[in-house]
Image: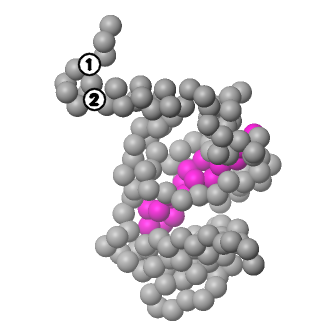
Amino acid sequence: MGVLFHVAVPAHDLGAARAFYGGILGCREGRSDEEWVDFDLFGHQLTVLLSPRESTRARRRYVHGEHLPVRHFGLVLDWADWEAWVRHLRERGVELSARPHVRFAGELGEQATVTFEDPSGNAIELKALRRPDELFERTPEAPLRIVRLEERRRGRASGRGRRG
């Protein structure tokens, strides 16, 4: 069996979740009852739990030039499958909350990404790496980027702007 991933997300309506995950994404439905439904999401277990009060859109944060959902889950696909899924989502009329685009073009970790939401506001990201073996690789300057980001945050928090 190997290692499988399991994630559980809230839903305001299990019928809408079934229509989205089963109908649009094509996930096979597994076990269920009145309060939850299991789906086969690319061989992994996605459990959708009826919980209307917790079903809200994820807070967004400005990342890589776009406002992206902070709370999300996703899948890393190969490039051709990613392109096919973007076409599929568009053909099925799924609203894309982050346009399909390529990050880090020509750099370590070059990746295509798209983000969309289920009917309950759970954000899903599909991505593909140009070179899949770079999924966990870090650039030598990565720690420097983090330090610069922290310096900018401290500057904003203290009321200081950019230094000239």
Residue at (36% x, 63% y) in the render = 56
The 10 Å Cα crowd at callout 2, few under 14, some 14 to 19, many 20 or more, is few
Give whichever of 154, 123 is nearer the camera. 154
Q: Residue 107, how many percent across, how many down? A: 68, 28
- Magenta part mainly helix, strand or loop? strand
Name the element at disc 1.
Answer: loop
Left or right: where 17 falls relative to 112: left
Q: Which residues are magenta?
A: 114-130
Q: Is residue 38 visible?
A: yes
Q: Amino acid at mark 1?
A: Gly
Residue that numbered label 1 is attached to: 161
Residue at (44% x, 67% y) in the render = 120
Name the element at disc 2.
Answer: helix
Residue at (19% x, 24% y) in the render = 159
Residue that numbered label 2 is attached to: 154
Residue 116 magenta = yes
Q: Given the current orientation, which residue lies at the most extreme left position?
A: 159
Which of the 4 quarters of the picture holds residue 51? bottom left
Q: Residue 7, how many percent across, how many down? A: 53, 70
Q: Amino acid at mark 2?
A: Arg
Residue at (40% x, 43% y) in the render = 61
The answer to whether 115 is drawn above or below residue 13 in the figure is above
Q: Residue 45, how many percent across, how many down? A: 61, 75
Q: In the rendered structure, which disc, 1 or 2, sits on the residue that comes first in sequence?
A: 2
Which of the 4 quarters of the picture holds residue 112? top right
Q: Is residue 111 visible?
A: no
Residue 123 magenta = yes
Q: Given the current orientation, which residue lies at the most extreme top position?
A: 164
The 10 Å Cα crowd at callout 1, few under 14, some 14 to 19, many 20 or more, is few
